[in-house]
Image (cartoon, rainbow, N blue to C red):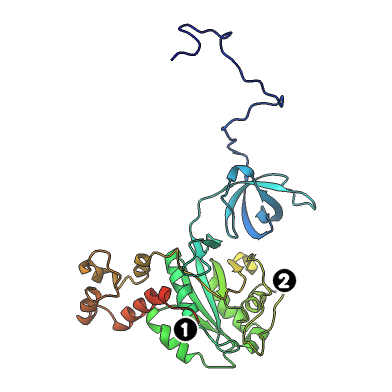
Amino acid sequence: MRRYGKNPDEDDIRVRPNRKGNRPRTNIRPKHEDACEGLVLTVDRGRLTCLIDGRTVTAMKARELGRKSAVVGDRVAVVGDLTGDKDTLARIVRVEPRTSTLRRTADDDDPYERVVVANADQLAIVTALADPEPRPRLIDRCLVAAYDAGLAPLLVLTKSDLASADTLLESYGALGVPYVVTNREELADGAAADRVREQLWGRMTAFVGHSGVGKTTLVNALVPERRRATGHVNAVTGRGRHTTTSALALPLPGDSGWVIDTPGVRSFGLHHVDPSRVILAFPDLVPGTEGCPRACSHDEVDCALDAWVADGHADPARLYSLRRLLATRERREGD
């Protein structure tokens, strides 16, 4: 049905009046080709601190980004007042594609993913050997999250003056995860920081761990000019207190890398992890999966990995480690 007849002209077209008297809205958005690139250092209540050309700039997310958020480690495009002066505010108009994304969920039944950091190269899992006691299940879960995100894992064991690291290291020996063992005396004289710094060279490393394990104390030793508040372990519960409330990216001296200090975690849910990706962290076992049935979980009777390992193609301890990691979603951290 024709609304305006066969040959309408401009006088026949009814134009809806604009009551506000302003310009009509458009879906065409500016490309912001003159935006400057920045690195998100921390996020606090909607305000993001970004590093741009050697200075820190406070910014907020532009409305055009919608629900897409920026997290610590993100590389972003920023426009507006980039002087970094007090009471100035810039706008983040674009979040650049990420090279890696470390995620976690509150628990294994929670479908809501929380992005911990972006663009990290390495995940340092900090665990105390005593006070509080080590939690192997939490370590396993962090390892799975690292493998899923494509991050290189690093195990940092603290407080070796209170307990030996031998038992814990033996259980992770087959995984081939690099490690550093420290004690409180070495942290005081700087020897521990020097050994850890060797593992961080040229990388952006996210530090995760349970509250009270000495994570922030270690970060303070690595970057002494940017000291953060630390807490103590409760003598009754054996748990640490959350003194780090937000993630913060800090440059290592001499532009040798970055460390990201994150708040202490009590759980590390893996609802978002695809179990089929965990096997990729075991390249010596991947060829053995060619004979596996479709959708094999690699922890069932018909799994071809058992015969592959039995024929001497791989170390049995490696298969045990793989299956232990795959089972982490079925166990709680404290089990």
Q: Is residue 211 left or right of residue 113?
A: right
Q: Quadrant of residue 315?
A: bottom left
The picture places residue 23, in percent across and down from the top left corner, at 67, 26
Determine which residue is flagged by label 1: 335
* Residue at the extreme front: 1
- Residue type of the residue flagged with mark 2: Glu
Q: Residue at x 68, y 85 (%)?
A: 188
Q: Which residue bears the numbered disc 2?
A: 225
Corner quadrant of residue 301: bottom left
The amino acid on which the numbered mark 1 sits, given as a three-letter code, is Asp
- With 10 as the anchor, is 109 left or right in this view? left
Q: Is residue 150 visible?
A: no
Q: Nearer the viewer, mark 2 or mark 1?
A: 1
Q: Residue 286 in the image: x percent, y percent?
A: 29, 69
| Pointer 2 or 1: first along the chain | 2
**SS category of the residue bearing label 1:** loop
Furthest-right residue in this view = 86
- Residue 29 higher or lower than 331, as above or below: above
Is residue 329 in sight in this rendering?
yes
Which residue: 66% across, 55% down?
Answer: 50
**Quadrant containing the N terminus in the rendered view:** top left
- Name the secondary structure under disc 2: helix
Residue in the image at 51% along x and 66% along y:
105
Question: Do the numbered discs 2 and 1 sit on residues whose CB atoms are within 8 Å?
Answer: no
In the image, which disc is placed on residue 182? Answer: none
Q: Give whichever of 92, 112 is nearer the camera.
A: 112
Q: Nearer the viewer, residue 16 or 259?
A: 16
245 versus 165 height, above or below: above
- Where residue 273 appears, x then y in whole percent? 42, 65
Residue 68, horizontal then vertical, whole percent: 56, 50
Crowd rating for badge 1 (residues with CA inside 10 Å; few <14, some 14–19, many 20+): few
